[in-house]
């Protein structure tokens, strides 16, 4: 094991333990953290992390009703090298559309500038050109790319299912590619006349 890997082991260990506390399995943890560690380094990092934590750090309390506890929403974080780590709470809040492409054609900038997306829990609200669109948005961070399953409840998309993929290259940028027809999750962040997808870039708002 290289000396540089040993120095970073405590950081990896603490992050691994953080996700163990919320019931994530090891492979899921590596996906969340974006780690590509060899098995020896993965085990070493976990051991180092355990040595710095209380003995009961991995215990998960059982709820009174006997049902497994829901996954806890954890805050966004950064790796030691500055790489942003998207988690289940990263997308929460208000976003403004910066740009968009639909059916391979640029989305009108005047409409993009007036479009906002509010994500709160598993609910969403889009305001575009003064028109509201509300519904549910369930995220799947176990898929690559991350996925959204959107169900329209009120507005222009009421009764529709929209499938999308998303990524966060930074804490302030959200990229989403929608299949507005709801046929399948897009496989890439691109919109063409052939696939008919709607690819958008949002920026976080205060």
Image (cartoon, rainbow, N blue to C red):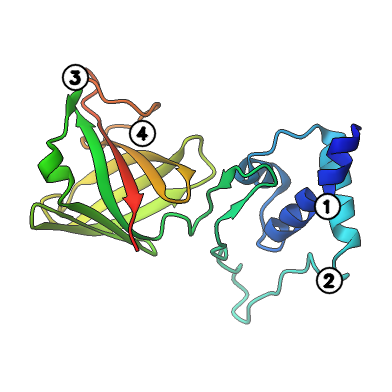
Crowd around label 2: few <14 · some 14–19 · many ≥20 (10 Å) = few
Q: CA distance from mark 3 to mark 2?
A: 55 Å
Given the current orientation, which residue lies at the most extreme left position?
130
Percent x, y of residue 67: 59, 71
> CB under 8 Å between callouts 1 and 4?
no
- Earlier in the chain: of badge 4 and badge 2, it is 2
Horizontally, is 117 left or right of 130 in the view?
A: right
Answer with mark 3 or mark 2, whichever residue precedes in sequence.
2
Closer to the camera, 175 or 183?
175
Residue 196 x, y percent position in the rendering: 21, 26
> Which residue is identified by label 2?
56
Is residue 154 in view from this perspective?
A: no
N-terminal-most mark, 3 or 1: 1
Residue hosting label 4: 185
What label does residue 117 carry, if any?
none
Q: Quadrant of residue 77?
A: bottom right
Quadrant holding the N terminus: top right
Q: Secondary structure at mark 3?
A: loop
The mark closer to the camera, 3 or 4, is 3
Determine which of the numbered discs, if any, sits on residue 193 in the image: 3
Please report whichever mark, 1 or 4, sits nearer to the chain's N-terminal start: 1
Q: Is residue 143 above or below residue 75?
A: above
N-term mark: 3 or 4 = 4
Q: Is residue 24 above or below residue 182?
A: below
Find residue 10 and name its label: 1
Mark 1 and mark 4: Cα distance apart in space: 37 Å
Going by the image, does 24 lie left or right of 39? left
- Mark 4 vs mark 2, CA separation in Å: 40 Å
């Amino acid at each position: 094991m290289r000396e540089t890997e040993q120095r970073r082991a405590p950081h990896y260990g603490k992050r691994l333990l953080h996700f163990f506390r919320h019931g994530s399995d090891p492979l899921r943890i590596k996906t969340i953290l974006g780690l590509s560690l060899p098995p020896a380094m993965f085990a070493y990092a976990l051991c180092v992390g355990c040595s710095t934590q209380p003995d009961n750090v991995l215990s998960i309390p059982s709820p009174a009703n006997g049902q497994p506890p829901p996954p806890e929403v954890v805050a966004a974080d950064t790796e030691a090298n500055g790489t942003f780590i998207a988690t289940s709470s990263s997308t929460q809040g208000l976003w403004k559309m910066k740009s968009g492409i639909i059916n391979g054609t640029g989305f009108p900038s005047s409409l993009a500038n007036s479009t906002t997306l509010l994500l709160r829990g598993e609910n969403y609200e889009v305001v575009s050109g003064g028109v509201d669109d509300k519904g549910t948005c369930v995220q799947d961070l176990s898929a690559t790319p991350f996925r959204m399953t959107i169900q329209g409840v009120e507005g222009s998309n009421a009764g529709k299912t929209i499938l999308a993929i998303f990524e966060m290259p930074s804490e302030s940028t959200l990229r989403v590619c929608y299949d507005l027809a709801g046929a399948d999750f897009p496989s890439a962040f691109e919109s063409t006349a052939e696939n008919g997808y709607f690819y958008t870039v949002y920026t976080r708002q205060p």
